[in-house]
Every structure is written in structure tokens, then in C-alpha cells.
Image (cartoon, helix red, strand yellow):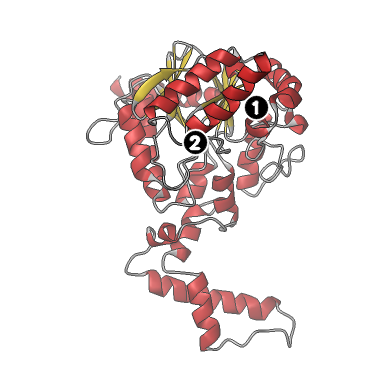
Amino acid sequence: MRFFSALAALLFALTFSTAARAQAQWDNVARVVAIGDLEGDYEKFADMLRTAGLIDAGGDWSGGRTHLVQLGDIPDRGPNSRMIMDHLMRLEPQARRAGGYVHALIGNHEAMNVTGDLRYVHPGEFTAFADNRSARRRNQLYNRTLTELRRTTPRGQLPLFDEAYRARWDSEHPLGFAEHRAGWAANGRYGRWVAGHDAVIRINDTLYLHGGLGPAFVNAPREAMNDAVRGALRGRPTAQYADILDHQQGPLWYRGLSRNPEDSERAHLEALLAFHGVQRIVVGHSKVTSTVLPRFGGRVLVADIGVPRGHSDPHAFLIIENGQPVTVHRRQRVPIEASTAPAACAYLARIAALDNNSGPVAELNAQQCAADAAAAH
């Protein structure tokens, strides 16, 4: 009897997981925590989880039925992406057992790492994969590279494989490089994990994704986009959205909701909200200022946090609890009320006060709200 009960529970869990994945939507969720681009900063990630009450002192899930949404761009520019992903992998089953959920959405930098675009990879990312056998693995990779070059390069065009060539190649392929590429491959531990997630989801009345959706994707179903992103990462692109990983209006790249003038983007936003049946859209990807920024009367919330050099990172993130959005900024909760221009200015002023009225938010508040005040007169 115990065996059949366990089997029934497993089948139920698999059925629920498949259904949730197919529809990419969740309803009746009381609390959602959304954090933006992490870019290899594990300490920031862990601090935000602790502040949100999602992990205990040992780093295990303590968030109950909360849904955590990480908006993509875990890797690049920082050294500890692997630590972040390993921690998320650990939290995913713990959250599910507690009735919560961890949504690690796919961003453009996840896609870049899987497909081999390493322009922004921090050197520390390779170091994190290195061990006492890395020199041997690198040598094996070098030999395979030479074999492939000799096979594919026309006669007379081969470079001279001398010591200088090897030194240059080693500098471009540091220790840990081979392991990094194996881990991020489509069939590797991290590439496979990334490709098992969504790019666009709806929770309650809010749409979450990394970049945004441009006019070319205004009527694109969530399921179709998610299938296309996952398929492309696995080397099996769909005919309908074959270029979705690179399309500048697609869910991994579009910046219009975060940066375009609101008057020029408003009609498009209205169409998106109507198509997906939501009241707001939460995005990362675009560093507009150093806190969660409401746009379009709060119908778009930009949660990628940009901190210029010389300013401390406020570790700002978003909580939507019982339908009410709140920014957590320097561990202080600031309700997001931005339905009118004065309300949005009051919100920015409260955030700026937490920054001692200096820094990016204070500057944005001075520019934007002074302009609005002048226009009102």
C-alpha cells in the first residue's frame, strides 16, 4: 500500500509539473518575490533571499508558498554564477515541497553562454570550474582543436602551431574553460538546467520575463515562445520563432518597455496587456536606475538594478504581496504607487531618501519630477 501511495504521489507531481510547464501560468499566488539581473554576484543574491525571508541561516528554503522569480541574466560580468545556479537548483525542490516555486527565467546571457557567445564572461567564471585536472583537459581540448583545424582549413592557410600560437591559445582558453563549456553545453549540467525553464510566465495578473516583447511578438503565445526558446537552446529551433534567441524584439532582448518614451510605446503596451490578460509587466535586462522603476503608471516595473561606480548597491528587488507591489531597497519596504505622476514622484523621493538623497534615483527624481512639475504649470 505504501508503494502505491508513493507512486500515486509521484504521478500527481509529474502531472502537475507538466501542466504548469505547458501553460506557463500560476493563479492565486499570495506572494511573489522578483529579483533582476544578478550577473555573477552571489553575495547580492543570497542577501536578497535572506531579506525576503526565502532562506534560513543554512541557505535552505524558508519561503513557504512564496514564488521566487529570477528574471534572467544570472551569468557574466561577475565570478560566481555557478554558485547562484547551484543554490537555485538546491532551492527548487525545497520550494515545491513547501508549496512554493522557484522560477529561473531565461535571459539573453543564459542563451549566450549556452550557444557559446562568451564576450561578457568574467575570468572568475572559468576559475570556478577549474580543478587539479584542468591542465590535462585543456591540453586535450587544444589537441582536438588542432585536429579540427587541420581537417577543415584549406591547404596553405593553416597557422604555424608554434610556441607563440600555443601561448596565445592558452590565454584565450584559461584553466577551467573546457569545464565551463562542458557545463554550459546544451547537454551539460547548467545548459540542460537553463533549457528546462521558461522565458515568459504569468503569475496572477502579472507577466514576468527578462527583456520585454516588441511589436513582432505582440500576439505571441507564452507557450509558443517558451517552446521556441527551449528548442533553440537544445539545437532544435522552431519554424515560427527560429531566431528567438537573438531577435531584438523577442523576450530575451527587447528594451522598449524600459527605455522608449512612454507616449510612443503606450499603444503597444496596451496591446500586450490585453493579449496576456494582465495588469502589469515585470522585466529586467535594462539598467535604467538603481531601484525598481515604475513606468506607464506602474503597469511596467523595471527590476534590473544599475549602480554606477562610486555608489553602493541597494540590493533592490520587488515583492508583490496580495496584489500590492513593494520595492525592497536597502532592506526597507517602499510601496509602489505610481498611477499618477505626483504619486510616481513621491515614490522616487522615498527611495532617494534611503540613498541620502544622492545617487541615480535622486538624480532621476530631480530630472523627471521637475519636468513634470514644470509641465503642470
At a point 39% along the width and 69% down the height, the residue shown is 134
Q: Residues within 10 Å of mark 1 (few under 14, many from 20)?
A: many
Which sits in the foreground, 213 or 331?
Answer: 331
At a point 69% along the width and 41% down the height, the residue shown is 244
**Measured Cα–Cα span from mark 2 to mark 1:** 34 Å
Question: Could you say whether the residue bearing mark 1 is in a helix, strand or loop?
Answer: helix
Residue most toward the left?
57
Which sits in the foreground, 133 or 33?
Answer: 33
x, y (%) of residue 81? 42, 48
At a point 58% along the width and 12% down the height, the residue shown is 339
x, y (%) of residue 96? 38, 26
Location of the N terminus by quadrant is: top left
What amino acid type should be assigned to the residue bearing mark 2?
Pro
**Residue 222's disc number:** 1
Which sits in the foreground, 368 or 4?
Answer: 368
At a point 35% along the width and 23% down the height, the residue shown is 332
- Choose the circle earlier in sequence order: 2 or 1: 1
Give the mark count.
Answer: 2
Tell whether 278 sits left or right of 321. Answer: right
x, y (%) of residue 173? 49, 70
x, y (%) of residue 374? 64, 19
- Classify 188 as above or below 35: below
Query: Is residue 204 in sight in this rendering?
Result: no
**Mark nearer the viewer, 2 or 1:** 2
- Classify 247 as above or below 23: below
Q: Residues within 10 Å of mark 2 (few under 14, many from 20)?
A: some
What amino acid type should be assigned to the residue bearing mark 1?
Arg
- Classify 65 as above or below 39: above
Q: Which residue is mark 2?
A: 360
Which sits in the foreground, 140 or 72?
Answer: 72
